[in-house]
Image (cartoon, helix red, strand yellow):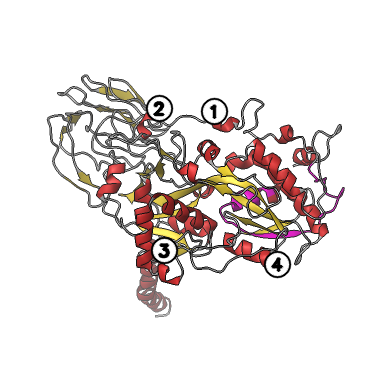
Amino acid sequence: MAALVAFLTMAAGGAVGTGLAPAGADSYVPIAGAGSSWSANALNQWIADVYSAGMRVDYAATGSSDGRSQFLNGTVDFAASDIPFQSHPTDGSAPELPKGGSYAYIPVTAGGTAFMYNLVINGQRVTNLRLSGQNVAKIFTGAITTWNDPAVAADNPRLVLPNVPIVPVVRSDGSGSTAQFTLWMIAQYPDVWNAFCQASGRASSGGCGATSFYPTVTGMIAQSGDLGVAGYVSQNYANGAIGYVNYSYALGAKFPVIKVINAAGYYTEPTPDNVAVSLLKAQVDTSDVNDPSLYLTQQLGGVYTDNDPRTYVLSSYSYMILPTTVQGQFTTAKGKTLAAFAYYAMCQGQSESASLGYSPMPYNLVQDTFSQITKIPGAVVENVNIQSCHNPTFSTTSPNLLADTAPQPQACDKQGGDQCANGTAGDTNPTTLTGGSVGSGSGGGTNPAGGGGGTSSSGSGSGSSGTSSAGSGAPARSTAPGRAGAPAAVGAAGGGVARPGTAPRGGAATTGAKAGGAAVGTAATGGATGAAGAASTACDPSSGGCSGPTGDASASDSGSGAFTQAALAGTTLIPAKRGWTSTQTLMVFVALMTAAVVVAPALTYRYVVRRWP
């Protein structure tokens, strides 16, 4: 932290000034803010960063609506909100009418509203689900209710999805991310949203426009804040749940997110790179610096329809709302603290954004926010050398270097008959696929025409189909004689021998697995489902039942006889945690107590009789 403070302090020669000084060298009055939970992970990191410089910033992630309300009531010194003040709400809520000239917006975080989900099949987690925008809208409006719905299956051609109810998890509080989500649905799928809004009864209370308060109907779960939504979805009992949160929460929870299709026909997730690309199409209002209601606000229609393959459609900015007059509990002394914190957030703080799951602000917006900070009463205006902010988007040749260098999506992420195996967000472990050619996901292989068959030892494979990365399992062998293109299972799951149709406890077989796992030439678990014309077996992972294989390809384990059943194709890699449960503990305790009550008196009696006859 000493290096951080040194950076933040006015350097010799005046290279950087941020208003912060080492603890003891200057004093800061504590300040308090409230609002967006979508931005909270970034804000809380920056608050922790500046603490050792003698600055105390308290922040309550109570939701964007509450943050704006508290700002208007003068009970906080600043607010954070994913949307501006709603002076003309379209959902029947009361107008928010701040005094003219009393506030200013600065975009402080950029990121993606992600759809974190929990889908477990036979004790293993799915990590690579994909959805069209229409299917996302239908799930959150009750039009699609099970994971094996044909429309969802069409987005996931390499998975056999279970007949598990979908449980949409929405926000119970006034949420800017709810507003952004419903705004997107209204713009892109108005018929889907309007039908749901009418059925929910919301229309009778004032309108079916974008809303911060999600209409909750039977079958949905409502939770407060991104943390509440992520917390519910990540529970063991929440199989089938899906909720919308900032991408950073899925990273923290180590859970996957949905890849959503974009206008270019690619399924993407809101990585910092993809968000940077997406927001190149956002229209940020710079028409009138003296109109606080509009200046630096965003219009996202261009993001929704951007045909760059890297775009993530629900990318957006979130804002700090800064006071520009002394009001409520806010004073000029607090203004000094707030300005120093805002300088830090927009300069050095942005260098941490990507590691937290956000996308750093581009050069032009950082410049614009510095001019906004000077409007805070009590602000110590700093001559910040913006090039010293260490922001990864900055370049002398590009408006956003991060967007310029963002990688293109993989071929298997394009809409069609293929699908990537690799996971997303907080769970990048690959998922076992079924049928077709193996997608070029993480460590994925291909199935070229030609006779299959291969062997491997310790996770490294050979043969004409499939590849693998290093593994630690025992050697395994699988053959697939007969048809051209028949795949071979290569590699063994860590801690056990991978045989066709089995998934040892050490880990299930997968395409191009990571160290300690197995790799197979196809995505079927150690199996024999492969290129066109090869055998295919339909399995329902929810029931464990499989129909017999069709076609004439086969696979056998050395000495174990013919392989006649694919091993629960469509299941995933991450074994559910197994161990001593609380129920088992209670049963043993009861048994011991029962034994003590029954046996102890008899033993005591015998002891007494023998000792004193």
Q: Residues within 10 Å of mark 4 (few under 14, many from 20)?
A: some
Residue type pointed to by label 1:
Thr
Label 2, label 3: how far apart the Cα atoms are: 40 Å
Q: Residues within 10 Å of mark 3 (few under 14, many from 20)?
A: some
Label 2, label 4: how far apart the Cα atoms are: 56 Å
Q: Give the labeled residue for mark 2.
A: 469
Q: Residues within 10 Å of mark 2 (few under 14, many from 20)?
A: many
Q: Which residues are magenta?
A: 18-46
In front here: 84 or 416?
Answer: 84
Q: Give the labeled residue for mark 3.
A: 221
517 drawn magenta: no
Q: Mark 1 falls on what kind of element?
A: loop
Q: Which mark is residue 75?
A: 4
Q: What is the quadrant of the C terminus in the image?
A: bottom left
Q: Name above or below for residue 600 compared with residue 575.
A: below
Query: In the rendered structure, are the residues bearing label 4 and label 1 in contact, judged by CB atoms less than 8 Å apart?
Result: no
Q: Give the labeled residue for mark 1.
A: 405
Label 1, label 2: how far apart the Cα atoms are: 27 Å
Query: In the rendered structure, are the residues bearing label 1 and label 2 in contact, judged by CB atoms less than 8 Å apart?
Result: no
Q: Is residue 476 left or right of residue 224?
A: left
